[in-house]
Amino acid sequence: MSVEGAQFQRRKIALAVYLPSFLFAAGESAVIPVIPVIAKEVGADLAMAGVVAAMLTVGIVVGDIPSGSFVARVGERVAMLWSSVIALVGIGLAVFAVHPFMLAAGMFLIGMATAAFALARHAFLTTYVPFAYRARSLSLLGGMFRAGGVSGPLLAAGIIALLGDPRAAFILTTVFTLATMAVLLFMQDPESAFGKGKLVLESDGRLLTEGEDEVERETHGLFRTIWNYRHVLIRLGSAAAITAALRSARTVLLPLWALSIGIGDADTALIIGIATAVDFALFFPSGHIMDKYGRLAAILPSVLIMSLGILTLSFTHELDMRVALFVTCAMVFSFGNGIGSGIVLTVASDIAPTKNPAPFLGSWRFFADAGAAIAPLGIAAITAIASLAIASGMMGLLGIFGAFLFARYVPRLTPGGARNEKTP
């Protein structure tokens, strides 16, 4: 099969590849804004409500532990179907919750399902998409998750306003999850479009097709995989964790900063909403840049712009123009994040084993998701000990260190790191 044939096949099955990711992400994100409200309804105080809301992220991090071996054993499609079933169980627990712990358990299960689902689709694209088109494919995957993340809360707001009950958001989550299962069951299985062989394009341009009976099926536990790949994970995995931490920090830092300088709730929502739109609008160019000019051409500008945006913010708190500077820094950060869509996914796919990538991708995602989970806690701790400005500055400096790690190790450890990839 030629590269052009592979490209045609991918276009033919694009809907089956990306639609489930959009639907699943929209369903998961629909409930995020209402979890603290529902937690208070079932008896949680403010602190406990925060813990319940955090269980979604905890579930994702914990879910990364078995996901690699699970996906490697049962296959991507079956893993996504089981993830949807687990998500439905979590939704049921949350809808009928009468105690904060029951609600927390439901969110934890949804988080675990999200981890396995995202890994399965990532593993599929890593295995089947030729190297020349990999970054574009993964940037589009990241864009679908972002599109779902934007659409879910907006639709949830409408249905809650209509029905007057925050638990109505779970109706959307249920519908989207069932729709995901329907797409997986009744649309063409993307793997079948490539036949039983697994299509990959090596960095030297060789097109390889590996029969299923030749594919290594050995699976490892997460921590054994981390140990086996400890050298690359310490270097590039740490860079991925820092990037994820930067992105996660924004969701906490920007609202807190707006509050601290006296911006009203409605104006804060508007500013962050526009910044999110800027972020989402730029998701596709990132993949094109990485495929055409090399990975660092997107990675370094993205991470450095995010880092410098958040670092600059730390010096503006007491200035007369602090509101205008806050808006500017928020937009700059979103621009940097937008042009970096898919960078963490793409680097992971570049360095993953060709024959059986899922266990390695699970360990990589564990690093990245742990960074995302720790960042808000770190900001809260630094703010309590010192100040919000110092927390912002430290995150900016950490991001610059992450950019250094990428610059140092991407050319050495990935096939397209620093090369000028002249692809179609």
Image: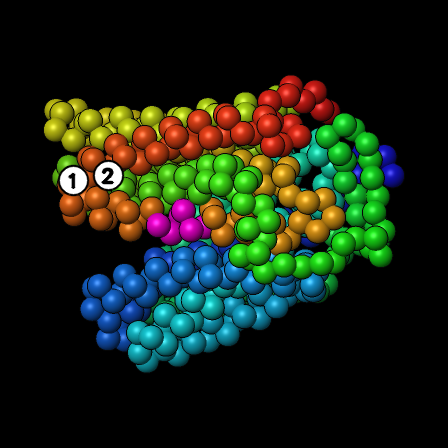
* Residue 5 horizontal/vertical position (percent): 83, 37
Q: Residues within 10 Å of mark 1 (few under 14, many from 20)?
A: some
Q: Which residue appears at 23% of the width and 26% of the height?
A: 325
Q: Identify the amino acid type marked 1.
A: Ser
Q: Secondary structure at mark 2?
A: helix
Q: Which residue appears at 41% of the width and 39% of the height?
A: 242
* Residue 253 horizontal/vertical position (percent): 27, 42
How was the colour assigned to the protein in this rendering? rainbow
Q: Identify the amino acid type marked 2.
A: Ala
Tell me the number on the disc at residue 323: none
Height in image: 96 above or below 54?
below
* Drawn side of residue 332 relative to residue 177, left or right: left
Q: Which residue appears at 25% of the width and 67% of the height?
A: 48
Height in image: 229 above or below 390?
below
Magenta region: 369-374
Q: Verify whether residue 113 appears in magenta.
A: no
**Contact? badges 1 and 2 (CB < 8 Å):** yes
What's the magenta bit mostly, secondary-structure-wise?
Answer: helix
Q: Which residue is mark 2?
A: 391
Q: CA distance from mark 1 to mark 2?
A: 6 Å
Q: Which residue appears at 43% of the width and 38% of the height?
A: 243
Tell me the number on the disc at residue 387: 1
Q: Verify whether residue 372 appears in magenta.
A: yes
* Residue 369 horizontal/vertical position (percent): 45, 50
